[in-house]
Image: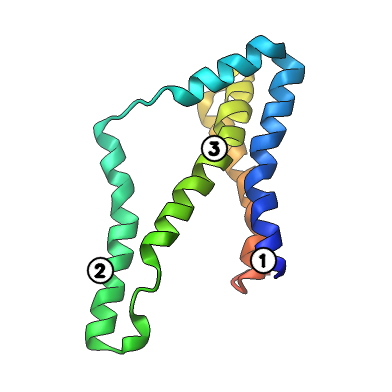
Amino acid sequence: MTGLMMFPVMLLGPCLTVMALTRVVGGPIGLNELFMQMRRIRLGGWYSGLLIPPSLILLVLLFMKTYVSEAYTPNRFFVGIVFGLIAGFLEEIGWMGFAFRALSAQRSELSAAVLIGVLRGFWHLPVIDFLGTALF
């Protein structure tokens, strides 16, 4: 039950925080600009690369199911992909919609990306710890 309570907070936290910060910093115009930016969809060839990790996971699971054990049968795999897309969208509003834009205005895009990567790592530590895969 703890995990179920933790995930909505971790997903909605960045999203709701960025909406509040955008309203405070940019006013109604800033909030409107954020929503307009969220509506813009820029599809390029590199988006197809996003299909590689879930495809590889599915192939490995199917291989292991066939040659190792039925215990590796993919279970609700596509539900997980849908949940991941929603979760990613809600988190990205905060991390890239506000934090990256604000940091990259003050420093290089590379250093802003590295800093956000470190912050995101710390943000996800409770989930990693909850799942039992923490290194500490």
Give the residue pinned by disc 3: 92
- The picture places residue 128, in percent across and down from the top left corner, at 62, 64
Label 2 vs 1, first from the N-terminus: 1
Residue type indicated by callout 1: Gly
Task: Point out the image quarter for the N terminus.
Answer: bottom right
Q: How far apart are marks 1 and 3 (CA)?
A: 21 Å
Q: Residue 59 carries which label?
A: 2
Please report the residue visible at 31 percent of the width from the left and 38 percent of the height from the top: 47
Please indicate, yes or no, whether residue 123 appears anywhere in the rendered image.
no
Residue type indicated by callout 3: Glu
Q: Residues within 10 Å of mark 3 (few under 14, many from 20)?
A: some
Please report the residue visible at 69 percent of the width from the left and 12 percent of the height from the top: 28
Q: Distance between the residues labelled 2 and 1?
A: 28 Å
Q: Give whichever of 26, 128 is nearer the camera.
A: 26
- From this viewpoint, which residue is outermost toward the top? 29
Of helix, strand and loop, which one carries label 2?
helix
Q: Nearer the viewer, mark 1 or mark 3?
A: 1
The reply to whether the C-beta atoms of the residues labelled 2 and 1 are less than 8 Å apart is no
Of helix, strand and loop, which one carries label 3?
helix
Give the residue pinned by disc 1: 3
- The picture places residue 83, in percent across and down from the top left corner, at 48, 54
Q: Is residue 59 left or right of residue 122?
A: left
Label 1 vs 3, first from the N-terminus: 1
